[in-house]
Image: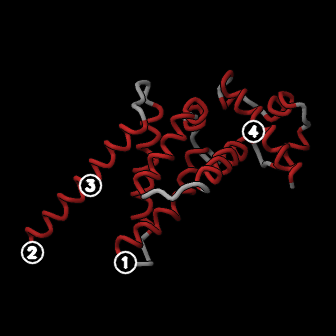
Amino acid sequence: MADSNITKQALAASLRELMKEVQFEKINVAQICERCGMNRKSFYYHFKDKYDLVNWIFDTDFIALSLNLSADRWELIEIVCNYFYENRSFYCRALRVKGQNSFSEHFREFLHPLIRTRIGDILGQKNIPQLCVDFITDGLVCSIERWLLDKDCMPPEQFVSTMKLLVQGAAAEIYHNMNRAE
């Protein structure tokens, strides 16, 4: 298992380096392997394709990041945004790739169960319509993408503060209007 992780980390480091020099779409598995002195067989033993490698990088980093978290939800979001901001060059390139197996789609799939659980906790329900989960997930992913891809990307603390103000303000307005309607 340790050797497997070392191989995966070497391939990940190779891809990260290549993505600093070349657009993701123009990188192929042979280049990734050549950069770290491995063969294609080793790559395909661990990953389906280069998209799978990008997703593994995120999953591995996020799991390592989340092991040390005991923060409240907004602090957690800020920690995640700090991670994206610190790795902005890599994720900007990864987020520009669209379609099947893209990081953007992987990120959405990653967030779905987390958001489903959170909506269920808020509403006190277990059966949350998929449309609701998709709506919140798409809004969150799109907001993070736009923030990271903006050439004048604001610091993560400012981004989270802005989102928090917007979400809490909207929730307060909805609550106020519901009480007025009763």
Q: Amino acid at mark 1?
A: Gly
Name the one closer to the observer, 54 or 169: 169
**Residue 78, how many percent across, how many down?**
44, 46
Q: Whole-Å distance between the Cαs marked 3 and 1?
A: 19 Å
Q: Secondary structure at mark 4?
A: helix
Residue identified by numbered label 2: 182
Report the side of 178 relative to 90 (left or right).
left
Residue 5 x/y as whole percent: 82, 48
Q: Are marks 4 and 1 in contact (CB under 8 Å)?
A: no
Marks 3 & 1, CB-CB < 8 Å contact: no
Disc 4 packing (10 Å; few <14; some 14–19; many ≥20): some
Query: Mark 3 vs mark 1: which is more N-terminal?
Result: 1
Indicate the position of residue 57 as horizontal and vertical percent values.
68, 44
Task: Check disc 2 and give the amino acid type.
Answer: Glu
| Residue at 43% from the left image edge and 44% from the top image edge | 142
Quadrant containing the N terminus is bottom right
Residue indicated by mark 4: 12
Of discs 3 and 2, which sits in the foreground?
3
